[in-house]
Amino acid sequence: MSLQADLRLTRGLLHLGVELSAQPGQIVAVLGPNGSGKTTLLHTLAGLIRCQHGQIHVAGSLWDCPAKNIWMAPEQRRTGLVLADHLLFPHLSVIDNVGFGPRSRGVPKADARARAAAELEALGLGDRLEVRPRELSSGQAQRVALARALATDPALLLLDEPLSALDPTTRAQTRADLGARLGAFDGITILVTHDPLDALSLADRLVFIEAGHLVQEGTPQEVIAKPRDPYVAQVVGLNFHRGRRIDDQQVDVAGTTVVAPEVPSGAAVCVTIPPSAVALYRMRPQGSPRNTWPVTVSDILLIGQTARVSLTGPFALVAEVTTAAVAELRLGVGQELWATVKATEVRAYPA
Amino acid sequence: MRALRWSRAGLLIPAWVAIAFLLVPLVALLLKADWTGMPAQLAKPSVVPALRLSLLTTSLALVICALLGTPLAWLLARSTHRVTPWLRALVTVPLVLPPVVGGVALLMAYGREGAVGRTLLEVAGWSIPFTPVAVVFAETFVALPFYVLAVEGSMRGLDPRYDGLAATLGASPWRTFRTVVVPMVAPGIASGSALAWARALGEFGATITFAGNFPGRTQTAPLAVYVALESDPQAAIALSLVMLLISVLVLGALRGRWLR
Amino acid sequence: MRPQLCRHARFAAPVAAPVAAPVAALAVAALALTGCSAATGSQAKAPTRHTVVVLAASSLTESLTAIAADFEASHPGTDVQLSFAASSTVVTQVNQGAPADLIALAGTSSMGPLEKGRIAKNGIRSMAANTLEIATPPGNPGTVNSLADLSRPTLKVVLCAATAPCGKAAVKTLTAADVVAHVVSYETDVRATLAKVRLGEADAAIVYHSDVVSARGRVHGVQIPASVNQRLDYPLVRLTNDPTTAELMTYVLSDQGRKRLRDYGFLMP
């Protein structure tokens, strides 16, 4: 029941050209900036948009193949769709909402209800069966939407930013519920999100799309270790630059030398520096590590006990320091400082 | 402060004038009626058949409006075709057409010499004018635009993502229409129905031109009132009051249930 | 001479700003609607138009229109305003206060409901007479040749409503001839009845002889025997004492008027 898709179409200013494949049981997270084509990709898989070129191959059958004039309508595909807004049918009770799919596919009423009840139990909503959607909290409603999508036994479960409309506390809880439920789901899940935490905690594979094209894919570990694109690096929270190899231990980044423990062969190199490795000083430190640069503070973001300080200098950097440090250094926008990074914290790998 | 009071008055005065304008004739009708003679008036031979015919034909007209108009409203609401605005304008035409003109048009189409009527007569031996069917035709013709426009407005307010979701769940377009769209626009359908039914009930010009005036067969309540007015004004008033009562009851009942 | 304004046009004294504008607008609209005629602003003695409002039975449509045109041509400065409906409707309107100077009805019995107080002194004259005739579409597709044919169940016969004089007369004729016509519709007045025949929707209708003549070949007439036919006298009733109205009344009854009436199929009283 695998997925093999080659999606190519143009919609307005977006030219989508992405190849996607997945195995049953996998959860693939699709990330990208706004307008990158993530939702279009999802809707094409669902059958709400048609491919202009390419094909969609699921579990041995062709769902969409313009070249062969084949196109399966959405109601014939085995997909489940969950959007950011739950869009539960307001005139139906929770159990009837979830039973809508099976009923539409010809399952007798009693069996559909039983199936719906089972799905809702699995998501901890067994006691809200006869309630109307308007009486549910947002988290509950989103879980019902998930149950509704799963009740049809889809081969492909398509989630379009399912947690984005929830408040942070509900989001955390629902993310946990989602993870647990998806663990027991043996179809393919495509999860579109731009929350890195969703991707990193739920997905087996990450796919990054920008302007309709794939820029990187891999397991969370691979991507965290070696992002190959500024957006990807931003998602995983690393400082990222492209540079040219100088020698085994030096890389030229925007005209400045960066020292790394080992630099691969090949001219083009990616360099990453974790924000926590960037140390800030008011004066140029003595006996300093070789990676020392003058920088200017451009922005400060406080998150609890941590501060993310955006810096401009020979190249852009983000430093993560404690709030205490902010006070100590009396950090403010426009302030000139010195940033140092231990060579061992720098990572260089082929581009 | 004074300016504010004048400003409010500027809004309230026209509003009250409007209310008075509508209420005064109705109150006058109630006052001028001969209440003691009412039972005798209502027992006159033309009254009950006219009311019965009106209620029957308007109910049929409403059913036709719902069966034909709801899918049309859906089409107009969801279609992005270039032709759609023209189609919508076409549906609006009977709204602005004087009813008699509508009646003449119906005759030209379905009369014995009419474009369609002639064939119908030759092939099936059916003739529509002068029959209760003609009454239903006339009433539907004038009421359908009201229904379609009210329901279409309601449908346009329906989030189109529901359709897509229902499709992914396996519902065919027909099933989606039946189980998702229609229930969700039920209030729009109710108010469209009320408007259409009320319009059909009051229809005169198209009815008398296309269906004629025959007691018990094509003489609807408005026609009966018109005819009675010249020979028997009290009978006309009595019948008018009954129609007023029926209208108020139906519209009142609908309003309470659906338009909350 | 200063321009004459209608008595009703009295502008309110200046009121607070927000109210003045709508009031003024309303006043202007009211002026327009009451149809007041203001004199032109010339200093010389301006000739005032004499308007005569005539409400008449619909069977007189063509004939009275022609007579009115003749009258206006021969009496410059006069304006005859005509309105046609079933005689019963005319009477109802007059009783309700419609501003008419002269009314012409079909059948003396139509005058019955007319409020006697509204009739001017010595104001009733007989202007014409009419009999009934069967009208069919050209070519007589229903092959109607007599009153008895009207009872055929395959025919569509249209009559005037019993409230209209032609309807009452038709009922009397059919009773006298002992015929039950296969009626499909009772129209509000004789012209609506005739229209159904002219449109080809009805096979036959009982209308006035004058209607068949006025239709000039667009309907085919079938005579009704005098033994069962009705003769209706057309009373011409003056309601006001206006001199121009009296002149018009005289004109209708004159030779010129009578000639016009005969042209359109009316009999002389």
Image (cartoon, grey):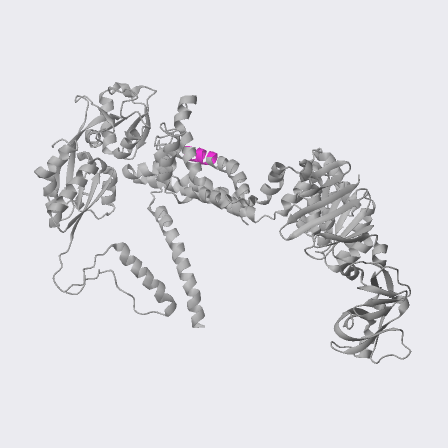
Residue B44: give x, y in percent of width and height: 35, 33
Whether residue A127 appears in this view of the structure is: no
| Image quarter (top left, top right, bottom left or bottom right) of the N terminus of chain A | top right
Whether residue B80 appears in this view of the structure is: yes
Q: Residue at x 81, y 71 (%)?
A: A256
Magenta stretch encompasses residue C102: no
Numbered-mark total: 0
Q: In this view, does A91 lie above or below C6?
A: above
Residue A224: give x, y in percent of width and height: 84, 58
| Quadrant of residue C203 within the rendered picture | top left
Q: Is residue A94 above or below residue A290?
A: above
Q: Which residue is drawn at 87% across and 63% down?
A: A347
Q: Which of A261 and B50 is in front in this view?
A: A261
Magenta stretch?
A: B53-60
Q: In this view, does A260 lie to the left or right of A45?
A: right
Q: Nearer the viewer, residue C158 or C46?
A: C46
Residue B5: give x, y in percent of width and height: 43, 68
| Image quarter (top left, top right, bottom left or bottom right) of the C terminus of chain A | bottom right
Q: Is residue A101 left or right of residue C104?
A: right
Q: Which of A192 and A108 is in front in this view?
A: A192
Residue B185: give x, y in percent of width and height: 57, 45
Magenta stretch encompasses residue B58: yes
Q: Residue at x 17, y 40 (%)?
A: C66
Q: Which residue is drawn at 51% across and 36% down?
A: B68
Q: In this view, does C18 lie to the left or right of C124?
A: right
Magenta region, main secondary structure: helix
| Quadrant of residue B121 within the rendered picture | top left
| Quadrant of residue C269 within the rendered picture | top left
Q: In this view, does A317 lie to the left or right of B130?
A: right
